[in-house]
Amino acid sequence: MGAKKKLQRFADVSSMPHVIEPTYDQAMGGDFPLKGNWNKDFFKNDDPIVIELGCGKGEYAVQLGKKYPDKNFIGVDIKGARIWYGASEVRETGMKNVGFIRSRIEYIANFFGKDEVDEIWLTFSDPQPKKARKRLSSRRFIEEYLKFLKPGGIVHLKTDSDLLFESTLEEIEEHSYTCITKTWDLYGELFDSLDSETQEILNIKTYYEELFSSKGYSIKYCKFKIN
């Protein structure tokens, strides 16, 4: 993508009311006005909130929003030129239950209040091969999620990375999270045994999933509760 087009998309994203770009002070823990007020002030309803961390182009947030009009979805990513794709689709279709936050995930707990989020999706996160603490399923991040995830809230992880998946399963065992589902080959060993609704959800494919699948990588998936 050329620099000019990227700048145009940054500007377009900044003009969209459904894309929130926190200030530096807000990201660092300052007064973020939507914290604890997403239902009341942003979505204007009391429906459950689901967030997609490292959402990239926002494929999961948008497609889940279409499937579940009675839930609210928020995609989070720092890359404005990527968010532009999902945010543009939301604008074009007039969806009211999908929004985006443009920020680093390290600051995620500063944007949500206690028990404000029902579910988290981690879709093809960076496996961080040299920095285990930076993996989005590491204990460091789980402790941040606990600040806003409801008791019994669910975390979904979908990845092509053996390293990230194995380390996530180790975290689940070490910290006694409740593992609901896990598979090293989603579309092979487990898929046909799933109910049709779950199949439809997991069949949503991000840009990165399509890319990695085309290169022969198996797709791993797990679903767990943080106790």
Image (cartoon, rainbow, N blue to C red):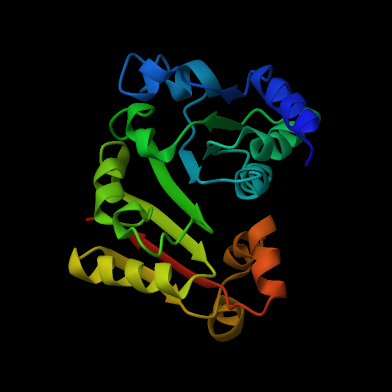
Task: Compare residues 7 and 155 and report the one nearer the observer.
Answer: 7
Could one spot residue 44 in this view of the protein?
A: no
Query: Does residue 173 sit above or below 19 in this rendering?
Result: below
Quadrant (top left, top right, bottom left, bottom right) of the C terminus? bottom left
Task: Compare residues 122 and 45 and report the one nearer the observer.
Answer: 122
Query: Does residue 35 sit above or below 170 in this rendering?
Result: above
Rendered image quadrant of residue 132: bottom left
Q: Position of residue 157 (x, y in %)?
A: 46, 61
Q: Residue at x 27, y 66 (%)?
A: 172
Q: Residue at x 75, y 33 (%)?
A: 3
**Furthest residue in direction left, as rendered:** 175
Query: Does residue 65 sit above or below 224 in this rendering?
Result: above
Query: Does residue 162 sit above or below 207 in this rendering?
Result: below
Q: Position of residue 44 (x, y in %)?
A: 54, 20
Q: Position of residue 59 (x, y in %)?
A: 66, 48
Q: Residue at x 28, y 31 (%)?
A: 114
Could one spot residue 59 in this view of the protein?
A: yes
Asked if residue 33 lies left or right of residue 90, the reply is left
Asked if residue 66 lies left or right of residue 30, the reply is right
Rendered image quadrant of residue 215: bottom right
